[in-house]
Amino acid sequence: MAEIPLAQPDISEQEIAGVAEVLRSTRLSQGPRLHEFEAALAERCACPGAVALSSGTAALDLCLQALDIGPGDEVITPSFTFVATVNAIVRRGATPVFVDICHDTMNLDCSDLARCVSDQTRAVIVVHLFGRPVAMDPVLEFCRAHNLHLIEDACEALGASSNGRPVGSIGDCGVFGFYPNKLITTGEGGAIVSRNLELLALCRALRNQGRTADGFLADRLGHNYRLAEPACALGVGQLARLDEFLARRSKAAARYHRLLEGLPGVSLPPRDCAHGRIAWFFYVLTLDAPQPRRDRLIAQMAGKGIELGDYFPPVHLLDFYRQRYPVLPGSLPVTENMAGRTIALPFFPAITAQQQVTVADELARILAGRG
Ligand SMILES: Cc1ncc(COP(=O)(O)O)c(C=O)c1O
């Protein structure tokens, strides 16, 4: 294992005790912890309800299904995201249409949406990448003008806000992920939030094989996307510490800024966000040099016990997508320019100042050819 890992969960003794208490009870699924976790999430996101699920992927699946998106429909989303965002569109039998990103924020470029829209477009999925909130007002305006659903993939951004509103609460629905590297974790897990009570009720039924209080949904295919009680208990404890995690992550980001400022050959992520609060999920640099140098750097740093991430290979360049959903050459210039040049540094709430100094020193040494 790397001496300085890329990510690391932070679980307190109190959270362990909370999980143990559930394990000693007889209620391991669909019990009080689920309701408690959902109520806390809803409150945090200023929504009337939340639906806790087995993963962020399950959350994306259910949002698309609940909005009745399927074969023949097109969904606009960035290629510069984790592949799960786009896989969910394809699993519905719909077609992903890739929008380009902005160079500095690495988030969707709203001015490129008009190029992507057609008579088949039904929805846009924005991704608040690396915890950086998308400026939602122009996206909302675009979706209203074209009568499109708006889904927020906020898997990496719990606690971020855009123009004063929590991410996830702004579009038709928002999704979160609770994998161990995320801003809070339940081991595996995810959730949907929405201001639309009907949509939430539908997602809640679809999570449980299509069951409602009155029976089964006759016209929908349900799933088992439930989140077990021990995971929900962990989620309750983690969510109570979200602000503490966010503060520690912000501090770690500021420290990387100070340590890396002026380092030749790399661009740092923007420190601030004019329209909202960043929930620092990853600290991602861009190298001036192309992919082979980046990959060599990752291997060299691994040799020093430091784990880096190659986040994210653009989805449209993965073989599955390249073959089935080819994009017009030159249509995603910024995404393709960034491809293979981004590096995520070790980043988690408990990272120490000394660990960050070690990362920065090794990075500088290797980039200067002294590795
Ligand atoms: C942007 C984004 N979308 C979706 C997901 C999928 O979440 P999960 O791994 O919980 O299925 C992730 C998780 O890594 C993600 O980062």
Image (tube, rainbow, N blue to C red):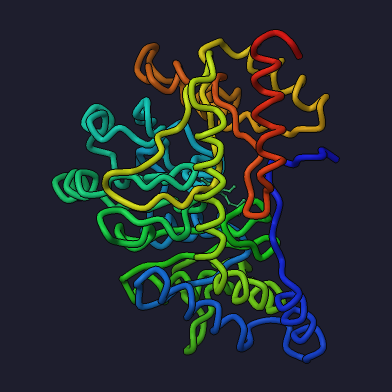
Please provide percent x and percent y for residue 340: 57, 19
Extreme-top residue of the structure: 369
Placement of the C terminus among the 4 image quadrants: top right
Extreme-right residue of the structure: 1
Answer above or below: position of 301 versus 296.
below
The residue sitting at 26% across, 28% down in the picture is 112
The residue sitting at 41% across, 56% down in the picture is 160
Residue 87: image quadrant is top right
Would residue 323 be visible to someone looking at this image?
no
Please provide percent x and percent y for residue 195: 31, 70
Q: Nearer the viewer, residue 24 or 265?
A: 265
Answer above or below: position of 86 versus 315.
below
The residue sitting at 47% across, 44% down in the picture is 89
Answer above or below: position of 351 versus 116.
below
The residue sitting at 46% across, 69% down in the picture is 203
Please provide percent x and percent y for residue 249: 55, 51
Answer above or below: position of 350 versus 86.
below
Placement of the N terminus among the 4 image quadrants: top right
Q: Nearer the viewer, residue 37 or 225?
A: 37
Please provide percent x and percent y for residue 3: 82, 39
> For the image shown, how many numbered marks are present on the structure?
0
Would residue 309 be visible to someone looking at this image?
yes
Residue 67: image quadrant is bottom left
Q: Nearer the viewer, residue 314 or 60?
A: 314
